[in-house]
Image: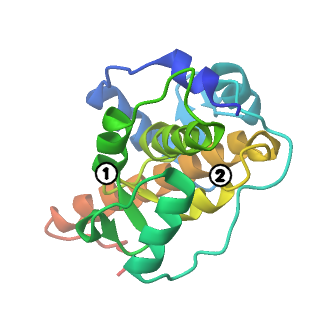
Amino acid sequence: MGFYGVLLCGSRQYDNHLITALVERWRRETHTFHFRCGEATITLQDISIIWGLPIDGEPVIGIDVSHRVEEWQHICLNLLGFTPLTSHFKGGHLSMTALYEHFMTAHIDDNSPEIDVVKYTRCVALMIIGGIMVPDYQGGSVRLIFLQLLRDIERIRSYSWGSAVLAFLYHMNGLSLIVRQNEFEENIPYAPYSAR
């Protein structure tokens, strides 16, 4: 499937002070970090080497279709092997809790039918995408647009997941910078160069 390198990295302890410092040094115009010694950035090659994600191939894009909850439940049953509760859906997102609960209760072994193994694999892939590669900035859910890309299990490796991760990283760094700028402007009595 191509996500094994992401799993090998395991969970990491985050240093919030370091992340804050890096976000403050991020320049969204050039997608670079500005340090005293020069500029640095994260490249596709970095993503490929660190996580082993493919950087060549089809783009990770799709149509963000608005389905009713009942339709998403039917899609989840067909592709993941379980029907999440209505409360596990919010817009085009599925709660990571629903995926985790299914992951923990599903029983896959050497005698399991291939279709069950494929559905379980999709569930694991969706957890990796939503939990590590492209986490929801509000936390706790994954965009169901990615489930559409997991429909054909043989094609998953043909997508440029590394490009999607890097684009997401650039996007989130830009959003973090905007939020921090707005917080700064709101906390000073007079901001003469405010964008407002």
Q: Residue at x 42, y 41 (%)?
A: 131
Side of 63 relative to 33 (left or right): right
The answer to which of marks 2 and 1 sits earlier in the sequence is 1
Q: Percent from the top left, x then y, of residue 189?
A: 13, 68
Q: Position of residue 161 (x, y in %)?
A: 69, 43
Question: Identity of the amino acid at label 1?
Answer: Ala
Q: Say whether residue 71 is visible.
A: yes
Could you say which is closer to the camera, residue 181 or residue 2?
A: 2
Q: Is residue 85 left or right of residue 178?
A: left
Q: Nearer the viewer, residue 182 or 85?
A: 85
For badge 2, the amino acid type reads: Leu
Give how far apart the Cα atoms at labels 2 and 1 are.
17 Å
As drawn, 50 above or below 106: above
Badge 2, how many Cα within 10 Å: few under 14, some, many 20+? many
- Position above or below: 160 against 36: below
What x and y, as percent, mark residue 100?
Answer: 33, 41
Image coordinates of residue 56 in percent, x first then y, are 85, 41
Instruction: Residue under label 2, please give it.
Output: 150
Look at the image and tell me whether residue 31 can be seen.
no
92 to the left or right of 16 = right
Front residue of 94/70: it is: 70
Q: Residues within 10 Å of mark 1 (few under 14, many from 20)?
A: some
Residue on which the image places disc 1: 98
